[in-house]
Image (cartoon, rainbow, N blue to C red):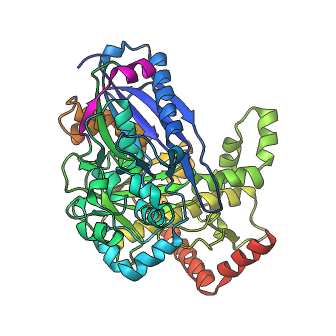
C-alpha cells in the first residue's frame, strides 16, 4: 500500500475538519470550515444541516487540493460526527423543519425529561441505555417534536443524526446507516444488545421504521459518487465508511482500545474516556456507558465531561495574567510561555491555593450547573505564577474526579493518553501525570477525533485488517510523563480538600445562592 492515503472527516459542533494522512499517521494536508448554531429562543439550539453538508464539501475540496496527492491514491474516508444532533427527512430524503436539526446542546425538552423520570425512571432508563437522564440525548427532543410539531413527526420518513445524512450525500445512497456508537447516544438503543430497544420505542411512541439501520463502525456504507467527486475532488468509487461518534473516534485516535487505557482531552471543554470490555454501570448513574466505535459489538466506553478545561487557563491568561500580553509585545515571547514560566517556579500544590474550574458549572460526576469557580486559600504569599499553576492543578483535579468515578465502576486505569490544548505545555502534562498518579502519554496527532475517523475508514476499506492494526500503524506518541510519586502524595492531600470544599459549598447552598444572585445582578 505504498503511497496510499486515507481521509478523516470530523463534524464538530462549530466546524468541520478534514485531514489526509499517510498510513504512518502523518498529516499530509487539512481543511476546515466553521458554521453557526441558531438560537431561536432561550435554551433552543438548532443547526442548518444543509449548511453543515456544504461545509463538508468545502473542507474536503480544500484538503484534496492542498495535499498534492494524486486523488487516485486516496483509498478511504471515515466519518466522525457530533453525537445526538437529530434531524427529520421525508420519504425522498429531503430535510424537514426548514433544514434545521436539533443540537445536542438544546435544552427545550425539560418537561419531556421529567416525563421520562416519572414514566420510565432514572434507574430503568440508565439500565437499558447506559445514559443518565438528560436533555442532551435525541430521545426526549423527539418526544418534544411529537408534542409540539406533530406535523413534522408525521411527515418524517426517518429520524436521523447527521452521520446518516452526510453518508447519503457523500455517495452512500442505498440506505440510512448509523453506527452503534452514535446510536447509543441517540437515547433509544439497548446498550447490551446494541439494537433499538423495542420497549423504549413503545414508551416514546416512536416506530422502529422511522429509525436508521444500526451498523458497525468501520462499515463501508457506499462509495464516492459523481456529484461528490465534482464537489470535493475525491475519486469516484472510493469507499465511504462509518466512523463513529466524535468522542468514540477520539478514543480510537488515541489508541484507547483495551481495558486499562484512558484518553483525556483538555480542550475548550474536557472529555475523559476509558475502554470497557463489558458494560459497567456507575452506581451513582452520573457516568455514561456507551458503545465504542468497533466493527464488532462487545466493546464499550465510559465517559465523563468537564465544562471548562483548557478554556479555564485561557480565561486566566485574558483576565488575570493579561500582563503577559504586554511582555509578549516587548520580548517576542508567547503569552502562554510567559505564564507557564512563572507557574513552573511554583512548588506542587501552589502553596495551598486551590482553583475550582467551574466557570461553566460542573458536569461529571457532579452534574451541578449551579457550581461556580473560585480561588480558595489566597494569602499574600500567592502571586500570578501561583494562581496560574493552581488553575492547571484544579482542571487536573476535576479530571481526577472522573477517574475516581471510573474506579467506582470497577475500572483500573493503568495509563492515560492526553490531547487538546494542555499538551502544548510540558508543565501541565507533568502536572496531570502527578495528579493522576499514572504514566501520561502525549500524542503526535492531538486531533484524535479526525485520525480516529481516518483509521476506522481505513479498516472499513480493508487497508488495515483491524482497529488494532490501524492504531498500531497510525497512533504515535511524542512523550511519556511518568508520575513523581512524592508529588502525587502532595496532590493526594490537596485533592481531598478540593473534593471536600466542593461538597461543602454545594450542600451548604452557597452555589445556589450565588447563581440566583448572578441571575438578578449579573
Which residue is depicted at the point 45% across and 26% down?
A: 60
Eyeballing the image, is 345 above or below 326? Answer: below
Which residue is depicted at the point 66% across and 78% down?
A: 511
Which residue is depicted at the point 34% across and 36% down?
A: 168
Question: x and y percent of residue 356 in the render?
Answer: 62, 68
Eyeballing the image, is 215 above or below 286? Answer: above
Taking the magenta stretch, the answer to whether it contains residue 173 is no
Q: How many dots with numbers?
A: 0
Question: x and y percent of residue 12 in the render?
Answer: 49, 44
Eyeballing the image, is 282 above or below 254? Answer: below
Question: x and y percent of residue 514 in the render?
Answer: 72, 77
Q: On the rendered structure, is 412 left or right of 298?
A: right
Q: On the rendered structure, is 15 left or right of 386?
A: left
Quadrant of the rendered structure where residue 485 is? bottom left
Nearest the viewer among 454 and 426 is 454
Which residue is depicted at the point 39% across and 24% down?
A: 228
Question: x and y percent of residue 463 in the render?
Answer: 22, 28
Eyeballing the image, is 253 above or below 150? Answer: above
Q: On the rendered structure, is 65 left or right of 335?
A: left
Taking the magenta stretch, the answer to whether it contains residue 223 is yes
Is residue 483 in view from this perspective?
A: no
Nearest the viewer among 78 and 383 is 78
| Residue furthest out toward the bottom | 508
Q: On the rendered structure, is 87 left or right of 334?
A: left
Nearest the viewer among 490 and 340 is 340
Q: Which residues are magenta?
A: 218-234
Is residue 383 in view from this perspective?
A: yes
Q: Which quadrant does the N terminus fall into?
A: top left
Amino acid at each position: 500500500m505504498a503511497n496510499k492515503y486515507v481521509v478523516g472527516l470530523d463534524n464538530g459542533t462549530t466546524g468541520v475538519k478534514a485531514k489526509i494522512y499517510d498510513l504512518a499517521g502523518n498529516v499530509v494536508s487539512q481543511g476546515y470550515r466553521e458554521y453557526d448554531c441558531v438560537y431561536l429562543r432561550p435554551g433552543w439550539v438548532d443547526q442548518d444541516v444543509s449548511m453543515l453538508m456544504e461545509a463538508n464539501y468545502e473542507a474536503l475540496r480544500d484538503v484534496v487540493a492542498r495535499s498534492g496527492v494524486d486523488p487516485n491514491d486516496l483509498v478511504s474516508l471515515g466519518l466522525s460526527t457530533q453525537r445526538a444532533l437529530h434531524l427529520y427527512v421525508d420519504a425522498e430524503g429531503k430535510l424537514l423543519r426548514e433544514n434545521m436539526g436539533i443540537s445536542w446542546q438544546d435544552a427545550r425538552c425539560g418537561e419531556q425529561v421529567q416525563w421520562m423520570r416519572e414514566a420510565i425512571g432514572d434507574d430503568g432508563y440508565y439500565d437499558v441505555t447506559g445514559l443518565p437522564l438528560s436533555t442532551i440525548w435525541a430521545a426526549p427532543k423527539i418526544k418534544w417534536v411529537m408534542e409540539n410539531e406533530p406535523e413534522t413527526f408525521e411527515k418524517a420518513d426517518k429520524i436521523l443524526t447527521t452521520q446518516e445524512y452526510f453518508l447519503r450525500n457523500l455517495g452512500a445512497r442505498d440506505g440510512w446507516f448509523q453506527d452503534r456508537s452514535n446510536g447509543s447516544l441517540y437515547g433509544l438503543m439497548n446498550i447490551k444488545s446494541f439494537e433499538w430497544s423495542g420497549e423504549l420505542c413503545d414508551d416514546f411512541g416512536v416506530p422502529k421504521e422511522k429509525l436508521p439501520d444500526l451498523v458497525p463502525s468501520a462499515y463501508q456504507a457506499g462509495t464516492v459518487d459523481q456529484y461528490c467527486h465534482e464537489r470535493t475532488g475525491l475519486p469516484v468509487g472510493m469507499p465511504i465508511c462509518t466512523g463513529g461518534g466524535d468522542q468514540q473516534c477520539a478514543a480510537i485516535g488515541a489508541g484507547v482500545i483495551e481495558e486499562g487505557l484512558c484518553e483525556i482531552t483538555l480542550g475548550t471543554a474536557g472529555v475523559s474516556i476509558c475502554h470497557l470490555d463489558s458494560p459497567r454501570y456507575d452506581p451513582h448513574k452520573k457516568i455514561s456507558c456507551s458503545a465504542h466505535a468497533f466493527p464488532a459489538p462487545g466493546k464499550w466506553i465510559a465517559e465523563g465531561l468537564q465544562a471548562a478545561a483548557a478554556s479555564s487557563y485561557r480565561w486566566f491568561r485574558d483576565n488575570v495574567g493579561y500582563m503577559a500580553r504586554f511582555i509578549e509585545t516587548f520580548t517576542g515571547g508567547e503569552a502562554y510561555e510567559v505564564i507557564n514560566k512563572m507557574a513552573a517556579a511554583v512548588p506542587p500544590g501552589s502553596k495551598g491555593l486551590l482553583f475550582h474550574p467551574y466557570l461553566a458549572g460542573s458536569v461529571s460526576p457532579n452534574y451541578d450547573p449551579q457550581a461556580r469557580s473560585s480561588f480558595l486559600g489566597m494569602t499574600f504569599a500567592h502571586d500570578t505564577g501561583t494562581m496560574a499553576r493552581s488553575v492547571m492543578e484544579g482542571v487536573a483535579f476535576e479530571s481526577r474526579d472522573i477517574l475516581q468515578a471510573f474506579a467506582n465502576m470497577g475500572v483500573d486505569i493503568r495509563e492515560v493518553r492526553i490531547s487538546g490544548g494542555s499538551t502544548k505545555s510540558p508543565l501541565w502534562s507533568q502536572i496531570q501525570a502527578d495528579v493522576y498518579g499514572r504514566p501520561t502519554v502525549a500524542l503526535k496527532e492531538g486531533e484524535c477525533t479526525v485520525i480516529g475517523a481516518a483509521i476506522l475508514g481505513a479498516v472499513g476499506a480493508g487497508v488495515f485488517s483491524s482497529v488494532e492494526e490501524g492504531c498500531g500503524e497510525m497512533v504515535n506518541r511524542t512523550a511519556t510523563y511518568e508520575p513523581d510519586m512524592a508529588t502525587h502524595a502532595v496532590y493526594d492531600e490537596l485533592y481531598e480538600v478540593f473534593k471536600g470544599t466542593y461538597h461543602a459549598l454545594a450542600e451548604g447552598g452557597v452555589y445556589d445562592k450565588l447563581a440566583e444572585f448572578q441571575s438578578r445582578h449579573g
